Image (cartoon, grey):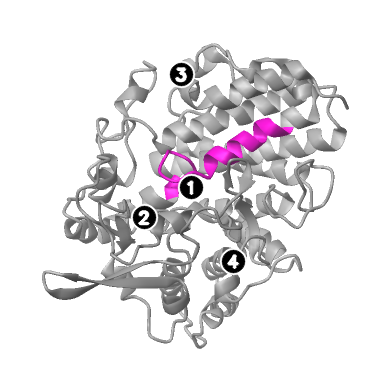
């Protein structure tokens, strides 16, 4: 298929201008590449539109999907913060003191709706396209449904009721009100089912036509993993067990030794985001953000986050995650040694080295924990304990022999906390979905120098977003 030079020109304009001109709930009349139908008549340019989403999702602290890791960990009780951050929204998340003034730009809301807009444009482009390879058209449609669902998953968990935009129509989107959460959850489930039907069973390369060893394009199994998580949150426990079982029983995936879990394309990886620097694959940003220098946290290095002591103390001495996934630096402060612990799941904290670690969004260990919880909720306590022990044993811990439902669920919540820390907001979202956020945060927020009220479990909208649509209302309580 010949390259359409007009499409490439429009696509270049799209990539360089998109992040500043598209706000989905208040979208100006399209003026970028996606409004040009020729973009979706060429495999290369159509694929590049989806690649643009993945690139944006992979950036920490800019409102991307990856930034959920940072903002949710600050909001919960995983991280501590060095004082003096030049960015006001960082201490605001940390002290649970958000308001429409201190989250001006780069919010998760902002980034998610940008991604949804592009996903909607891809779905609309696929409907009318006649020039794409059939396999590319099917795969891109599946990827767009998956991306739309994933972004709505984070939106509904972090903001509650949210506008449900399913097209790029300016007139419709500018008048959208917040949709009830149940309606958003139903759409997430619908989109993920469509994605699962459309996506390839194999991991594909950049052409979407050949199999690849890289696990960076969403596959049928990625959608299944997202469905398992979604069903758990929706309390559809039988469906959650079925979806997670399909992944656990799939020979494509296996639990890896602790030091290999976060290597690119590890056997545990169901889907990861591939970082890129100047067009070349690079290492996960988690390493650059969270690994502390020898001098410890501080304004000079810009490394301001480290693990809270209360979280570190949860790990028993036999738990190998304490030694493989956490590291520390010791510095002298006021004449005495001070120890700072930091996440060490991702071990490459410098740039310009060969790519060895990608940011894992879905991995197999979570599926064992999903199935364990789903089984416990259905009364299959022995099955739940078996799954829980798979994760404990990998961490060097002995089997647990708990038998009561609440005991097992409590153990599972602790295991999720220890296993999934600093990964896409699991701790923060778990506190909320299990109705424990008030009990935990009323103490945790005070320790962080803030205060807690129940409405703070959801994030507010920025003043910038509120000004764009009369139909859009602030999160209740703010």
C-alpha separation, residue under disc 4 versus residue under disc 2: 24 Å
Q: Secondary structure at mark 3?
A: helix
| Residue 452, placed above or below residue 116 | below
- Residue 66 covered by magenta stretch: yes
Please tell me which of labels 3 and 2 falls first in the chain.
Answer: 3
C-beta proximity under 8 Å, tags 2 and 1: no
Q: Is residue 464 visible?
A: yes
Give the crowd class for mark 3: few <14, some 14-19, many >=20 residues within 10 Å.
Answer: many
Q: Which residue is mark 4?
A: 371
Please tell me which of labels 1 and 4 falls first in the chain.
Answer: 1
Q: Position of residue 318 (x, y in %)?
A: 43, 87
Point out the stretch of residues depicted in magenta.
47-68
| Residue 61, placed above or below residue 179 | below
> Nearest the camera: 412 or 102?
102
Q: Which residue is mark 1?
A: 66
Please tell me which of labels 4 and 2 falls first in the chain.
Answer: 2
Which label belongs to residue 73?
Answer: 2
Q: Is residue 212 left or right of residue 340?
A: right
Give the crowd class for mark 1: few <14, some 14-19, many >=20 residues within 10 Å.
Answer: many
Q: Which residue is mark 3?
A: 26
**From the viewer's perspective, is the residue at label 4 or at label 2 nearer?**
2
């Amino acid at each position: 298929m010949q390259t359409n030079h007009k499409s490439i020109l429009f696509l270049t304009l799209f990539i360089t201008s998109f992040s500043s001109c598209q706000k989905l709930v208040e979208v100006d009349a399209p003026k970028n590449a996606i409004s040009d139908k020729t973009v979706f008549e060429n495999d290369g340019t159509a694929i590049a539109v989806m690649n643009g989403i993945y690139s944006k999702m992979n950036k920490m602290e800019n409102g991307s999907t990856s930034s959920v890791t940072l903002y949710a960990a600050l909001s919960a009780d995983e991280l501590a913060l060095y004082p003096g951050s030049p960015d006001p929204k960082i201490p605001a998340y940390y002290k649970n003191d958000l308001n429409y003034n201190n989250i001006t730009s780069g919010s998760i809301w902002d980034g998610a709706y940008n991604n949804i807009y592009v996903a909607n444009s891809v779905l609309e482009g696929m409907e009318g396209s006649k020039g794409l390879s059939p396999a590319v058209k099917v795969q891109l449609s599946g990827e767009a449904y998956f991306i739309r669902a994933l972004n709505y998953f984070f939106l509904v968990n972090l903001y509650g009721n949210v506008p449900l935009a399913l097209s790029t129509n300016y007139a419709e989107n500018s008048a959208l009100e917040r949709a009830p959460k149940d309606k958003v959850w139903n759409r997430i489930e619908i989109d993920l089912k469509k994605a699962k039907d459309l996506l390839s069973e194999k991991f594909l390369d950049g052409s979407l036509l050949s199999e690849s060893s890289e696990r960076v394009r969403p596959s049928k199994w990625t959608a299944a993993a997202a469905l398992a998580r979604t069903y758990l949150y929706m309390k559809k426990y039988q469906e959650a067990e079925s979806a997670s079982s399909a992944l656990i029983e799939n020979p494509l995936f296996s639990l890896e030794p602790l030091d290999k879990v976060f290597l690119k394309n590890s056997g545990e990886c169901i889907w990861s985001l591939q970082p890129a620097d100047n067009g070349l694959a690079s290492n996960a940003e988690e390493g650059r953000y969270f690994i502390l220098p020898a001098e410890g946290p501080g304004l000079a290095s810009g490394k301001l986050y480290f693990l809270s002591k209360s979280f570190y103390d949860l790990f028993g001495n036999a738990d190998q995650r304490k030694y493989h996934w956490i590291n520390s630096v010791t510095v002298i402060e006021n004449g005495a040694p001070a120890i700072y612990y930091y996440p060490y799941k991702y071990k490459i904290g410098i740039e310009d080295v060969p790519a060895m670690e990608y940011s894992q969004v879905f991995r197999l260990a979570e599926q064992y924990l999903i199935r364990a919880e789903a089984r416990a909720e259905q009364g299959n306590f022995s099955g739940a304990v078996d799954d829980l022990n798979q994760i404990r044993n990998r961490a060097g811990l002995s089997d647990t022999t708990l038998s009561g439902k609440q005991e097992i669920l409590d153990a599972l919540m602790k295991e999720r906390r220890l296993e999934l820390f600093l990964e896409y907001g699991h701790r923060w979202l778990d506190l909320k979905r299990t109705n424990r956020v008030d009990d935990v945060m009323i103490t945790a927020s005070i320790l962080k120098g803030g205060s807690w009220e129940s409405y703070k479990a959801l994030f507010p909208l920025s003043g910038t977003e509120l000004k764009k649509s009369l139909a859009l209302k602030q999160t209740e309580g703010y």
